Amino acid sequence: MQLTITEKAAEEIKRIIEQENDDELALRIGVQGGGCSGLTYFMTLEKEVRQNDKVFEQNGFKVLVDSKSAMYLDGTELEFTDGLSGRGFVFNNPNAQRTCGCGSSFAA
């Protein structure tokens, strides 16, 4: 599985982890059912590595992705935008066949 986290997104994630003041936290990225197109992305910080997780280190922090989400996220780029249209993380997913207007849900 390949997941790319841009430098700007990595800087923001590191900043958030530093605010939590816990070096053991890892970034969990996943996909769950819901949203207007069928699937939504989620990101959380947690310590627990689950049995079916894909675990890798990127940009100085640990990333966790469950095996089901890995199928949908392979090849995805996570970036962070801070512009006129808003501030936040953006998933650029080549597996998405259809996305909603808000960009937070997709169909694969």
Image: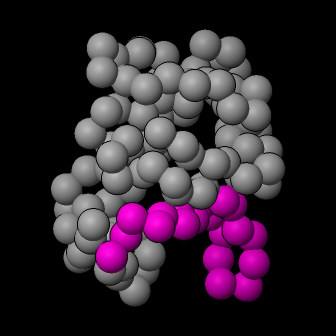
Q: Is residue 92 above or below residue 72?
A: below
Q: Is residue 41 above or below residue 68?
A: below
51 with respect to 73 (left or right)? left
> From this viewpoint, is residue 12 visible?
no
10 with respect to 57 (left or right)? right
Picture quarter with the C terminus: bottom left
Residue lying at 66% horizontally and 48% vertically, measured from the top left: 5
Q: Is residue 32 above or below residue 55?
A: below
The one of 16 and 41 positioned closer to us in this rendering: 41
Q: Position of residue 64 (x, y in %)?
A: 47, 29
Residue lying at 55% horizontally and 30% vertically, measured from the top left: 63
- The scheme the figure's colours follow is one colour
72 with respect to 21 (left or right)? left
The one of 45 and 21 positioned closer to us in this rendering: 45
Q: Position of residue 19 (x, y in %)?
A: 71, 32
Residue lying at 69% horizontally and 32% vertically, measured from the top left: 58
Residue 25 shown in magenta: no
Magenta region: 79-97
Residue lying at 76% horizontally and 27% vertically, measured from the top left: 60
Which quadrant holds residue 92?
A: bottom right
88 with respect to 36 (left or right)? right
Residue 85 shown in magenta: yes
Q: Magenta residues: mostly which secondary structure?
A: strand
> From this viewpoint, is residue 95 visible?
yes
The one of 44 and 41 positioned closer to us in this rendering: 41
Q: Position of residue 91 (x, y in %)?
A: 53, 62
